[in-house]
Amino acid sequence: MSQTISISHQTYNQLRQRAAQSRMSPDTLAENVLSDYLNQEEVVWQDAFTALLAKVHQRTAQFPCAEIEDDITQAMQEVKAVRYGY
């Protein structure tokens, strides 16, 4: 199923020129470029998240899991005490 979008004449002229250079139709080039861009956002986010997790794992590797869990539990109890007066 095909959909229609509106773009400026200037953008369409650039698209048409690039498509001719690449020996493809403007429709095909637009589809490829949009698809790549939309997929790239997800990949960039995933890469950033993976890098963040790697840093967290590196920094916490020296601590036993039980100690981390205890710290998290204690922090949750402190938050509940402040928020709800427990």
Image (tube, grey):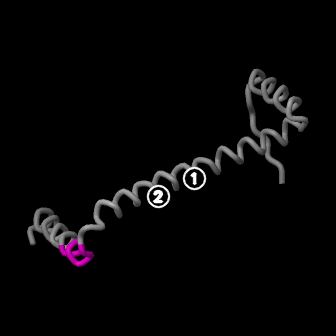
Q: Principal SS element in the magenta part?
A: helix
Q: Tell me which label, 1 or 2, sits earlier in the chain.
A: 1
The percent coordinates of residue 49 (x first, y second) are: 45, 56
Say left or right for 12 vs 50. Answer: right
Q: Amino acid at mark 1?
A: Glu
> What residue sits right under mark 1 in the picture?
42
- Secondary element at tag 2: helix
Classify 60 as above or below 67. Answer: above
Between 40 and 57, the one nearer to me in the picture: 57
Q: Nearer the viewer, mark 1 or mark 2?
A: 2
State the CA–CA distance, disc 1 to disc 2: 12 Å
CA neighbours of label 1 inside 10 A, class few (<14), some (14 to 19), many (20+): few
> What residue sits right under mark 2 in the picture?
50
Classify 63 as above or below 66. Answer: above
Q: Amino acid at mark 2?
A: Thr
Say left or right for 81 vs 46. Answer: left
Q: From this viewpoint, which residue is outermost toward the top? A: 10
The percent coordinates of residue 14 (x first, y second) are: 78, 25
Q: From this viewpoint, which residue is outermost toward the bottom? A: 66
Answer whether residue 65 is magenta in the image.
Answer: yes
